[in-house]
Amino acid sequence: MTMKPVLHSFAYCLDFLREQVAGVDAADMVAQPNAIPNHPAWVIGHLTHSCELLGGAIGVAPWLPDDWAQRFGTGSVPTADAGAYESKEAALEMLRDAQARISDAVKSLDDGRLDEPFPDAAYRDVFPTIRHALTQVLVGHTANHVGQLTVWRRAMSFTPLGRSFE
């Protein structure tokens, strides 16, 4: 069974994310209108972090700065302080790099490896196999956070993009 549909959906989600922030000023990347905490700067960093975590489960060596998990991992708290984040351009480039790393690694996996039990037993109820983890994180998790940006854009009173995330 191929992972091409998963990688296609992952790429589609990230392309939609990039469209959502294309015209956003750097200062607005950390805005939290109407108490919406997950602004674009945090979402981009979080999705980048997710790629590294998932990569670790399939043998990809860590590549992000040591403080990345603290700033963007589960339980991290987005802040309106722009100085706490990379520039918009740098963050998007780091996400593009993370996407390439995880996508290349996934393409190299065969069915035997994909169907191995997820290495962390604490997550096996959610991710029984590596294939389950890849599918959930690259599609479900990514789409969830990209969807948060559509709500954020509306709260910022930005012009709709002209297409929905379908």
Image (tube, grey):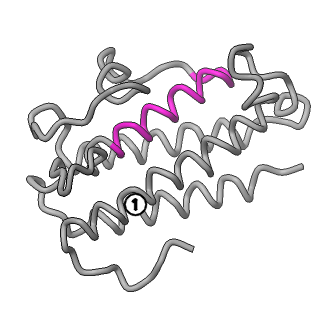
Taking depth in this image into account, of 123 and 99 the one nearest to the observer is: 123
Q: Which quadrant holds residue 44?
A: top left
Taking depth in this image into account, of 145 and 69 the one nearest to the observer is: 145
The x, y position of residue 29, in whole percent, is: 18, 52
Counting the numbered discs, the total is: 1
Residue 75 in the magenta stretch? The answer is: no
Quarter occupied by the C terminus: bottom right
Which residue occupies 74% across, 56% down? 4
Name the main secondary structure of what is drawn in magenta.
helix
Left-right relation of 128 to 137: right
Which residue occupies 61% across, 50% down? 140
User: Could you tell me which secondary element the residue under label 1 belongs to?
Assistant: helix
Which residue occupies 25% across, 45% down? 41
The x, y position of residue 127, in whole percent, is: 74, 30
Of all residues, the one furthest to the bottom in this rendering is 162
Q: Is residue 23 above or below residue 115?
A: below
Left-right relation of 163 to 159: right
Q: Which quadrant holds residue 81?
A: top left
Q: Which residue is mark 1?
A: 17
Left-right relation of 67 to 106: left
Q: Is residue 32 above or below residue 78?
A: below
Of all residues, the one furthest to the front in this rendering is 34
Task: Give the magenta part as a residue range.
Answer: 43-60
Name the residue type under label 1: Leu
Q: Which quadrant holds residue 56?
A: top right
